[in-house]
Amino acid sequence: MVKKSAYLLIVLFICLNCVKVSAQTAYFIDGYHGGIWGHYPDWNTRFMTEMLKKNPGWKINIELEPETWARAKVIDPSAYADFKALFADQSLKGRIEYVNPAYAQSYMYNISGESIIRQLSYGMKMIKSHFPEVVFSTYSSEEPCFTSALPQILTSFGFKYASLKNPNTCFGGYTRPHSGELVNWIGPDGTPIITSPRYDVEKLAAKSTWQTIAWNNSAEYVNEVLANGIAHPIGMTLQDAGWKGGPFIGDGLHGSIKSVYTTWRNYFADIAAGDARQNWKVTQEDILVSLVWGSQITQQIAQKVRISENKLVAAEKLRAMAKIYVNAVWPQVALDSAWRTLLLSQHHDCWIVPYNGRRGNTWADKVTTWTGNTNRLADSLTTAALMALNQPLVNGNFITVYNTTAVNRDEVISVKLAGTRNLTHMSLVDANGQTVSIQITDNSIIFKARIPSIGYAVYQLLDKGSLTAKGAGVNKLANGNYQVETDLYKLIIDPWHGGAIKSIIAKKLNNKEFVDQSNARSFNELRGNFYNHGGFKSSVDSAAKVEIIENGPLRIKVLVTGHIAGNNYTQVISLAQGQPRIDIKLNIDWKGNTAIGQDIKPIYKLDLPAKPFYDDHYKLLALFPLNLKKQKVYKNAPFDVTESELKDTFFNRWDSIKNNVILNWVDVTDNNDQYGMALFTDHTTSYTHGEEFPLGLNVQYSGIGLWGRNYGINGPTQISYALIPHAGRWDKAGIWTEGTKWSEPLITVVAHKHPLKMSRSLVKVPAGYEVSAINFNGNDMLVRIFNTGTSGQEKLIFGCRATKAILTELNGKEGEELPLSLQPHQISTTIAVPKFGIRTIKLVNAVSF
């Protein structure tokens, strides 16, 4: 009886203890973040290995730049070998998981979708070269390296899980909280991925501007999570490589809470495997991120990255044409080098700590070097492609125009001709022998080119009288205003008020007036708070000089010269016959480092949420009040477009961040999507909009930024932006395609010879489809498409031969074989891609007809 009683007591104790442990067990994601470019001391590999051996219950999740391992292997080969041995176990019981293989740990939301794919593909390839057993299961990041389209990208690379937490490094932002332990993160195309969200109860930490309360699994945090019905609470900190503490929360004991170290893979596949999940369609406005937008250094970094992105994808497509049409060698080594430095320039540290580093070798300096290399290689690759296709000579009479976008182009271009020619006695004919209207400016001819998608067309100069077009022109009106008119628009520029645009009438859209002439602000006005020079100043406060640079008949250019707060500025406003886009190039010649933005005291304190660089009200803005009722806003993101739910874009505190990021464009429409105006920018920055505030583009901030650093002005500000008035919603109006055309301008070459055929198209896709990239693996051509239009079965046409067409995942895994149909000089197939879907098609043994 005594034995039985004792036995029962023991059983009872064990059961109670089990309940207690189960109720108060939490889990923790520890590991390391950084790398050779960010921070990775040479001793770090040995340190991680020794700490893992010393602490058998410790597991780590690593986010280390892939280039780190080449140096680690040379510096300490035995430590490298020991780490590889520990890494080899990639089962659920394994102790190391690689959670972010991106080549340079980009923020993702601020770069192109194609760049995101290359970040992961190049990074994963390099990691596999060091750790052949690696399994990529979970995407997680210490920084807010998130964007809405990640689910389909990650799953196509073979990932199963993701985390939307970044509890210990939120300087650049965080994600919107969501109820529940797990969610199915639904991407814009409908792809789900099992995800650990930032919990509803995972509050931003008090007296902090960089943490949530999940950073150390405190008893307060875990108990609150448990009380909220979450059975398996988890916290996270990926330590900076170089920190010397080992296991971040020690033995994991916080009062009655016992935290167990785990990999994300084990957490999802074992610990929380059967837990309920809600569907959550994450939009870009759930990614709550911000940088020192408008500062000159951030602006220039964003511009350099954008230029390199545009150049490199265009160069790849040209090289694809050269490989198919003239069997040119595919330059993989040069392309790899160009992509490498572009990817490095997208490193999050370039954007959030641009001033860090030694003089002459800051992150901003590195971006200049890296993008410079990419640009040189892209230009060289482009030139080589054109030479292979054309054998260009200076005084040739053939003009070949190349189009690297997936849409037929019909637009005005300018070609500068070398040498001395009497252009007034020359004419231009197209591939069909038809004479084309031209406009002559200096030693250039301007004409309207018609070029097929991802292809080219040849024009020929002849020694005979030219055909002069009739159309666009500029007139000075009796009241001193200037009227700029094309077949599409009639603009009025007001020199008395800083060259503001008083009116934009879209002649083919029922003569719709797009400028809100009743608004207190003017259209294309520059306005900001120069708080050391009298407060708010505007370009409309004084008169401007208007000069006509080009006066049609095909293209118009008007130069506006004015001043704001004692600083001179110029705006070149360009329109062309038949072109829906209105281009504007802005240059501000600053006299010094003038302060622009919000003037608050104290100016900066690390743990104070209010910071002057957050509030765009006070920054120098280009403003566009629109004659559109009950306005709606759409904005693009990598492989996505979000309809905004923001009442306005303004905030002034770290704990109130809104996603006011403009990647390529924002589009404002009326409530019925009847009319709209799209604004395009040449760099990632912020935009403004509100119920009582017009659409605006952030042009300049100068003041205190992150960590109290002075983000000043050190030279002229030069930016380009564009406007497109349109009918219908963004997708019906083809706004994404218009943005791609702006990013990838037509390329011309003047040659003594021309390609064998006068006009060719390598890829034709339906309206609304984009060709994100074309590259080669051996003789197989890989074409990546992105659908911004409607879903349904659509036809794709390729101007080459191929033995097969196979849908291929981003990790190279082959899927469905598509049916191929052969027609004269082309093959075709059909495919159904959901809206915002990405697909890669492998054309096996692709060759010219």
Image (cartoon, rainbow, N blue to C red):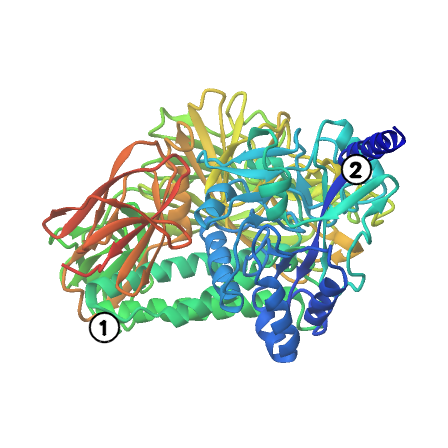
Count of marks overlaid on the render? 2
Whether residue 336 sits left or right of residue 328 in the image: it is: right
Question: Mark 2 Cα within 10 Å, few/some/many (few <14, many 20+)?
Answer: some
In this rendering, position of residue 704 left or right of residue 739? right
- Residue at 50% across / 48% down in the picture? 159
The residue pinned by badge 2 equals 21
Q: Are marks 1 and 2 in contact (CB under 8 Å)?
A: no
Q: Give the residue at mark 1.
A: 391
* The N terminus, quarter of image: top right
Task: Work out whether residue 163 or residue 262 is closer to the camera in this orientation and state it.
Answer: 262
Please tell me in which quadrant of the rendered image residue 780 appears.
Answer: bottom left
- Above or below, 355 against 650 in this view is below
Q: Which amino acid type is shown beneath numbered disc 2?
A: Val
Q: Nearer the viewer, mark 1 or mark 2?
A: 2
Residue 653 lies left or right of residue 471; in this view the side is: right
> What residue sits 67% from the left and 68% below the top?
362
